[in-house]
Every structure is written in C-alpha cells, then in structure tokens.
Image (cartoon, helix red, strand yellow):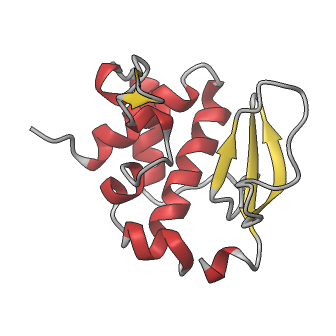
Amino acid sequence: MPFNARELLARIIQCEAGGEGLTGQQAVATVVMNRVHVAGGEYLRTGQGDIRNVIFQPYQFDCARTEIGGQYNSQNIYNMSPTSENYRVADWALAGNSLPAVGDCLWYFNPFSSNCEQYFPRNGSGVFHTRINQHCFYRPTSQYWET
C-alpha cells in the first residue's frame, strides 16, 4: 500500500534531517512544500502540486532512492520509522506553515564541510540563501524560472 502524503513527508523529514533538530526538520519540510506550491519552472511542471511527484522526482532526494550509483541505499524512506516529532513537523508543514528563515528556497544540500557553495544546483538555478545546521539552503535565481 502506498504511503499517504503525511507518511511520505514524515519519512523524508526523518531521513533527510532526523538529526538536525526541530528547526532543521522544519527547514527541510519547508523546501519540500515550497516545491509542491511553486508557481513555475521545473517543479511546477514535474510536481504538478502533488507531494508524491515532488518527493519521487528522479535524482532529487537521495532518501527517495533505494539505489545510488548501482549500490543499495539503506538510508531510504522505506527503512525509516518516523518519530512523533517527525509527524508533528509533517502536520505543521501540511497545514501551510513554513520556516521564515528558509523563505522560498527550493533546494538544500549538506556539503559535509563548513562552506556552502554559492550556487546549487550547479546549473546556477539556485543561489545560496542561508545555512541551518548541516544544510545549505538555496533560493531560485531567474534561471530557475526558465527550467
């Protein structure tokens, strides 16, 4: 049986930001919901306002993939057991809440270093906005709207 929107969001929150505390989890949830509600560009075209389409868009969230580079990815949403906090954050985001510090960011990335790249993805469609815990967050540039 496929997961409903709440379950999917709770699992992606846990998998992508489970160790990032409440603010980190809210930041990730905000990006996912920003993609669901974006007014144009690639994520509107591919996601069509549906959280399932957004989460399972190819090559977007490593946690939505069971295989990466030909190897089994054990850290995937199917192996997650969301906590009550993950569900609370999912409910918070699904109710229309967002983390103001994230704004309209459409991407986040853990660089595994203290520095955030100026642009992400590398095609220049996102520009650095803020860092929250281990993740760098990127808002769309004018180039994104042409995707």
Residue 128 at what x, y percent from top left?
Answer: 83, 54
Q: Is residue 38 visible?
A: no
The residue lying furthest to the front in this view is 70
Residue 95 occupies quadrant: bottom left
Looking at the image, residue 90 lies above or below residue 143: above
Q: Along the horizontal axis of the image, is 77 left or right of 108? A: left
Quadrant housing the N terminus: top left
| Residue that appears at 67% across and 74% down | 144
Of 74 and 52, nearer the camera is: 74
Residue 141 at what x, y percent from top left?
Answer: 77, 72
| Residue that appears at 55% across and 77% down | 41
Residue 115 at what x, y percent from top left?
Answer: 90, 34
Q: Along the horizontal axis of the image, is 42 left or right of 102? A: left
Looking at the image, residue 94 lies above or below residue 123: above
Q: Is residue 138 visible?
A: yes
Looking at the image, residue 10 lies above or below residue 39: above
Q: Along the horizontal axis of the image, is 33 left or right of 28? A: left
Quadrant housing the C terminus: bottom right
The residue lying furthest to the left in this view is 1
Of 60 and 87, nearer the camera is: 60
Q: Along the horizontal axis of the image, is 89 left or right of 17? A: left
